[in-house]
Every structure is written in structure tokens, then in C-alpha cells.
Image (cartoon, rainbow, N blue to C red):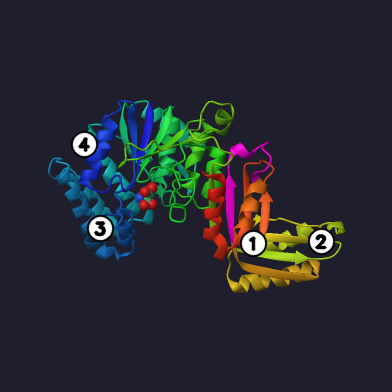
Amino acid sequence: MKAVKFGGTSMSTADSINIVKTVIESDSERRYVVVSAPGKTDTSGKVTDMLIGVFNAAPSARAAAFAPVRVRFENICAGLGLERGILDGEFNDIEVRLPNAGYDYIVSRGEYLCAKMLAALLHYDFVDATELVRFSGRTYDDAYTNVLCRAELEKHSDAVIPGFYGADASGNIVTFSRGGSDVSGAIVARAVNAEIYENFTDVDGFMTCDPRIVPHATTIDVLTYKELRELAYMGANVLHPESIFPVRKANIPIHILNTFNRNAVGTKIVPTEQFLNGQYDRAKKMPITAIAGKKHFFSLYIDKSMMNAEIGFVRRVLSCFEKLNIAIEHIPSGIDSMNVVFSAVERPLVDALLKSIENEVKPDSMHIATDVALIAIVGHGMKDRPGTAARAITRLSNAGINLRMIDQGASELNIILGVSDDDFDRALVALNGEFEI
Ligand code: ASP
């Protein structure tokens, strides 16, 4: 049996929801369905954004601010041929609560109404996420949720469930961060022991490279959880970053699929061990699975002769970052010098950092570069295969691109290259050409 999740674009209009219905009905295994709120259309914004606007309105103006949301749902219901007034009771309840309601209740109503609507269309049970997903205060309680969700869904042979939120022990609604319906889908998939978690979206899957920069980038058919983590970190944002953990724990694969392109095979994200054991095969056999990158990092270069003999030097430098709450990305180092790469921060914080390091370790010199782009070359195929880094470096050098940093993790799953922001696009094109992914 399969757990499926449909994102906002899939749920945005009566036409798209009719496609969703066809997709669900084409496979009788698709029995547990999680939905996002309707996404944006040519004429209307995302329902969740509209609801944030409702929350921000003065309490007495909230009902008026909610009116366009109501109209949006009424139009979708009419387009789907659902019984007139089917959601009237829900709208009335919401409108009564609006003046005194908190943020989480209001913004969660998009998913709630959407799930109500789809359940009616499919003749599936509606099960509210408040009965399934538990928070302790504002912190998601994974263990309790799994028990609760399992016990409740056992009572239903099919269900439509709103994504994005749950409730605390007193029944108050608590939302995940934006895009959190991906997490809800994974929670449901694990609770019902789904064979697969199908995540329907509006793209064909994860791409080998950013198609805006490398137009001939292709869709990756199989990606491991570990590879996904590396790519997501570098900004390949198809899935909510936390969405994998419930299914990852249960070794359930995720299948990213495009609601609007049923011919696309999509991307399967599979447990790393199962992939390495040969349980999944990739169509293309290459050392590299994908290349992703991000611009606008800072890189601090610190030089001090005999640095490597000075016990505690690196720790003291890093403690300066810690004191100022600056997260570190990479630390490539030499004998008498080290580099610390971190995400861009405001100028006063940089000044405070330099001062703190100056006091702490008295370096011979320090220099900060503020235009560093990082590129990750990711793939299990590079393990025990000599030459991957050499090929990458040679290709960049042949393209006249200066390499400012290189870092390979012990896992041999990725190689991180630093180039200047200005060289970023050219570097991606060159590397993609080298590995022909
Ligand atoms: N509707 C919410 C958002 O726009 C949650 C989601 O779509 O996953 O962020």
C-alpha cells in the first residue's frame, strides 16, 4: 500500500484536483492521501499566504480578510461538481473563531479545508491531523506521533489527511515550518507501513544540475538518502529538508513524481544501504550522481607560522565562531594556515569575529573573501574510484577557473569545490561537461 502527498500546485484548481483524483484512482494502493493547501494560480496567491494575511489583519477585520479564501474554496468545490454549500459549516466555524484565533490555527485552515474537499470528492474518510500528529509545546514528538497515527489510521481503510500541522496535548493546533506537508506525508507513510511514499509535485524530480544554468540537465532516477542530504544542503529544494527522517527511519523509499507529467519516471529516494547492496539500479552508471552549489559564502584565511605545533589553535579559532553564533560550513587547512568557510553574515559581525580571533590566537595575517561559491560533486560512485577529484580540478583549470578551496569528506560521497561567485555558472557547466551527467 502507498501513502501519497500532493503539493499546493496539484491542489490549486478544480482542474488540477481532477488530475489528482485520476492519479489516485488509477492505483488502488493509493489509500492514504496527505494534502497541502491550494497553491498559487494565475489570478490568486497561495492560500497559506492569504491566511497569513488574515492572521495579520486586525481581529475585527479578519472575517473580511478571510472572504477571498472562502470564495477560492467555493469556486474549486463548484468546479469539482461537489454539492453546493458542502463546506459552509466549516467556513462558519472558522469565521466565528477568527477574531481570537492564533497564527497556527488560522494558517492551518488551508490544509484542513483542502483535505475536507478532497475526501468528499474521493469518498475517502477525512482524518484530522490533530488526531495523528502530536507536538509537545512547539516541539514535534516523533515517538508519540507514530503510536497515535498508527492506532488511528488502522481504523480507516482509506483517508485524506491535512498536511502541515498537528496538535499539542491540549488540542491546540501547531504547524510545522513552511512546506511542512512533506513531513506529514512521511509521518503517515511510516505509520501505515507504506511500501513507498509518493510525493507528487510539479517538477519531474531532482535534476543532475540546476537546469537554469545547465539546460541539458536530466532527472535523476535513483538517489540515496545520503546523496539527497548533500544536495538539499546545497540548495536543491524539492523536498522539505526534514521530510525524510520519518520514512528514512523505517527504510521506506520516497518517490518524487509530477502530477502534471505522468510520463516522467520521477526520482526515487532510497535507503542508502539498500542501494549499496545492489537492491536498486541506476539507469545511468556514472561516478557522479549530481552537482549542486550555492553562492555567497565567506571564507576566512588565517595564517600563523608554526600553527600546527600550537596545541588548541584550531579550537580557539572555532570558539570565536561559536561565541558569535556563526555556523561553520567547511574548514580546509594547511600546515601553517587554515580556512573557515561560513555563510554570509553582516559586516559588524565580521568585524567582531576578526577582533575576537585576533585576541584569541594572534595570527600573522588574516584575510576574508566575501565572494565564495561552493559546488558539491555528489555520488556514491566515486568511492574507491581514483581520479574523480583530478578530473574535476583539471576541467576547471582547463576552463580557466581558479579553484579557491577543495574539501573531500571521509565518506567519499562528495567533493566540495570553492570558486568565486563570478565563476560559479561557468564552473557548473564545465563540471557537468566533464562528468556528462
Ligand atoms: N501550505 C504550507 C505552505 O505553503 C505547507 C505546505 O504546503 O507544505 O508552506
Tell me the residue at 52%/54% (across/down). Answer: 429
**Sequence order check, earlier mark of 3 and 4:** 3
Of tags 1 and 2, which is closer to the observer? 1
Residue located beneath label 4 in the image: 121
Residue located beneath label 2 in the image: 336
> Could you tell me which secondary element the residue under label 4 belongs to?
helix
Can you give x and y, in whole percent of width and height, for residue 247 in the image?
Answer: 48, 34
Can you give x and y, in whole percent of width and height, for residue 286 in the image?
Answer: 56, 38
Answer left or right for 392 relative to 39. right
Mark 1, ligand 1, within 8 Å: the answer is no
Q: Which residues are magenta?
A: 373-388
Under mark 1, the amino acid is: Asn
Q: Residue furthest front?
A: 398
Inter-mark Cα distance, 1 to 2: 22 Å
Instruction: Say which of 237 and 180 sits in front.
Output: 237
Instruction: Say which of 236 and 181 sits in front.
Output: 236
Answer left or right for 37 relative to 380. left
Inter-mark Cα distance, 3 to 1: 46 Å
Identify the image quadrant of residue 226: top right
Residue located beneath label 3 in the image: 44
Answer left or right for 196 relative to 299. left
Can you give x and y, in whole percent of width and height, for residue 422 in the image?
Answer: 55, 65
Inter-mark Cα distance, 3 to 2: 58 Å
Numbered marks: total: 4
Q: Is residue 345 above or below residue 240?
A: below
**Sequence order check, earlier mark of 2 and 4:** 4
Inter-mark Cα distance, 3 to 4: 23 Å
